[in-house]
Amino acid sequence: MATPKSIGAIEFSSIGIGYQVQDTMLKAANVQILIARTICSGKYIIVIGGSVSDVESAVRDGAAGAGEALIDQVVIPNVDPSVFQALGQSVVIEPDKAGALGVVETFSGVSMIAAADAAAKAARVTLFRIHIAMALGGKAYCLMTGTIADVTAGVAAAAAEARSRGLLVSQVVIPAPSRELFSDYI
């Protein structure tokens, strides 16, 4: 399948309802499951991709079936393509391209996806990791690099998105990080 134009995500407080809603979403529209799994602490997340209309339909039907188990949801039409690579942890940074380091941390995986997209659209940053709620107590974080000005703008945009949802934990810009902080990505 080609890179989707839109991304949608739903986070649940119930694993069973997560599976049930995943089935509903797959039957509602032609979407691709990007992530569907249990996450800390006893929650479930579904991330889908597809056309804008298909993702909107699947998320709408999924949220309607979630009841009180719904924690958070998002549909991002025309998602920045770098979000998919960072979610898949398939980004390699050239040693000379590692600049300032930006870190944004949220209380939910869904809010992190929206925040990372906001960062990528606001500044010329390289998103190189979006880590969603595994071994993090249900939190998520995103790592980005670029010039100090771009990372500062990207972190500010991501933090504003997470803050608007009431789910921002922290925002950090490290202007001249030690190269060891990039060791897994260079």
Image (tube, grey):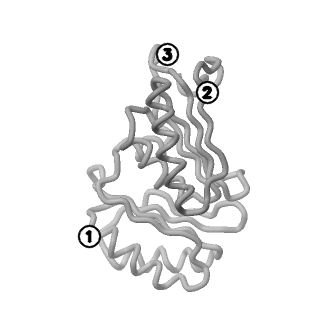
* Whole-percent x, y for residue 95 in the image: 49, 15
* Residue at x 28% of width, y 55% of height: 5
Circle 2: element type: strand
Residues at marks 1 and 2 touching, judged by CB atoms closer than 8 Å = no
Q: Closer to the N terminus: mark 3 or mark 1? A: 1
Q: Local crowd at mark 2 within 10 Å, few (<14), some, or many (≥20)? A: some
- Name the one closer to the observer, 128 or 120: 120
- Where does label 2 land, which residue? 174
Disc number placed over residue 148 in the picture, else none:
none
The reply, left or right, for residue 152 in relation to residue 12 is: left
* Whole-percent x, y for residue 129 in the image: 53, 39
* Residue at x 71% of width, y 51% of height: 135
Q: Closer to the N terminus: mark 2 or mark 3? A: 3
- Name the one closer to the observer, 65 or 111: 111
- Name the one closer to the observer, 134 or 97: 97
Closest to the camera, between mark 1 and mark 2, is: 2
Circle 1: element type: helix
Residues at marks 2 and 3, CA–CA distance in whole angstroms: 17 Å
Amino acid of disc 2 = Ile
Q: Local crowd at mark 3 within 10 Å, few (<14), some, or many (≥20)? A: few
Which image quarter is the N terminus in? bottom left
Disc number placed over residue 53 in the picture, else none:
1
Residues at marks 3 and 1, CA–CA distance in whole angstroms: 40 Å
Amino acid of disc 1 = Ser
Circle 3: element type: helix
The reply, left or right, for residue 52 in relation to residue 46 is: left
Q: Closer to the N terminus: mark 1 or mark 2? A: 1
Residues at marks 1 and 2, CA–CA distance in whole angstroms: 39 Å
- Where does label 3 land, which residue? 95
* Residue at x 61% of width, y 17% of height: 179
